[in-house]
Amino acid sequence: MTRGPESRDVIAVTIGVPTYRRPELLDALLKTLPARIAECADLGVEIDVLVVDNDPEGSARDVAARAGIPVRYVIEQTAGIAAARNRLLDECADRDLIAFIDDDEIPRETWLSSLLTVWREHGADAVMGRVISVFDDDVDPWLLASGTFRRPPRQTGTVLQVAAAGNLLLDLRAIRRRGLRFDESLGLGGGEDTLFSRQLAHQGGLIVWCNESETEDLVVAARLSRGWAAQRAFSSANAGTRIQLQLTEGRFRRMALRVRAAGRRCADRRRRSAQDLRRTHLEHHASRQRHAPLSPRPRHDRRRPRPPLRRIPSPIGG
């Protein structure tokens, strides 16, 4: 059914923000939302904002209370991003759409209006937008080359089989019909949005890309290290295996998947050991170079025997 400006129905949209002990970042996000909501004035929508605080102590309460727009605020006691996302779904039982955005992101112009426009044009069950990493410090070129923060653009309307929830619009009616929830067993390790979106696609849901919807993700200094990137890759691989196990039918297929995953982990450990050994060797060599004398004599020069002295005849005989 067509909804929006082409009909007299008003679409009920909620901007859903899960948060955990980042009041300064949440405050910066909430300050941008009045302008983003105003951009949707001609789209036949009614928009509200919902913050789900995953901190039992309610560290985001004051930020939500003093926001420049009305904000619904609830606390989710169960730890984990999956529990916070499920609480957002539960609190939106009477809403049509929810636009997920993380508390450390800043929406750029037309963020929400672009999502809504693409949702309507494609009749999608979910629309994913871009998340662009922004760095406040100098970045190690190795990190950029590793692909950890690489989120390439796509053509708007591209059909996706998986989506992240950092910038994601969901048609809640399609989600409720399918009985989909975020898996809370993945709430602390990550990957809950990957499993959720893959289940949606597997059940025939349409997920499309919106290249015009952009948010900025401020990458803090703690993430600008090779160690963090390696741990992120390791955690993502483990989460990917758990997700694939849940989506794979048949005991023998799951067993084969576990064997392949174990083989990849062994290969990764060997590769990391070789890299650590090479790094240690290079650091040791560099240390020896730093502590070596400025102009050392080659060892073979110190041991070289002196040439025999030539006897020069005396001009005086005798």
Image (spheres, rainbow, N blue to C red):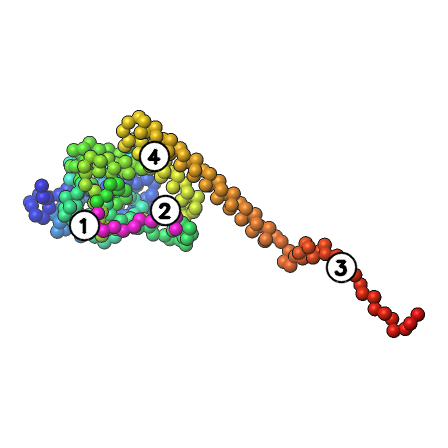
Secondary structure under the numbered disc 2 in the rendered image: loop
**Quick check: marks 4 and 2 in contact, CB under 8 Å?**
no
**Distance between mark 3 and mark 2 Cα atoms:** 61 Å
**Quick check: marks 3 and 4 in contact, CB under 8 Å?**
no
Return the mark for residue 241: 4
Q: Total of numbered circles in the picture?
A: 4
Q: Which residues are magenta?
A: 145-158
* 10 Å crowding of disc 3: few (<14), some (14-19), many (20+): few
Secondary structure under the numbered disc 4 in the rendered image: helix
First in sequence, mark 2 or 1: give its number: 1
Which residue is labeled 3 in the image? 306
Q: Is residue 37 visible?
A: no
Q: Residue at coordinates 83% horizontally, 68% vertically from top-left? A: 312
Magenta stretch contains residue 146: yes
Which residue is labeled 1 in the image? 113
**Distance between mark 2 and mark 1 Cα atoms:** 28 Å
* 10 Å crowding of disc 4: few (<14), some (14-19), many (20+): some
First in sequence, mark 4 or 2: give its number: 2
Q: Position of residue 116 (x, y in %)?
A: 17, 47
**Distance between mark 1 and mark 3 Cα atoms:** 87 Å
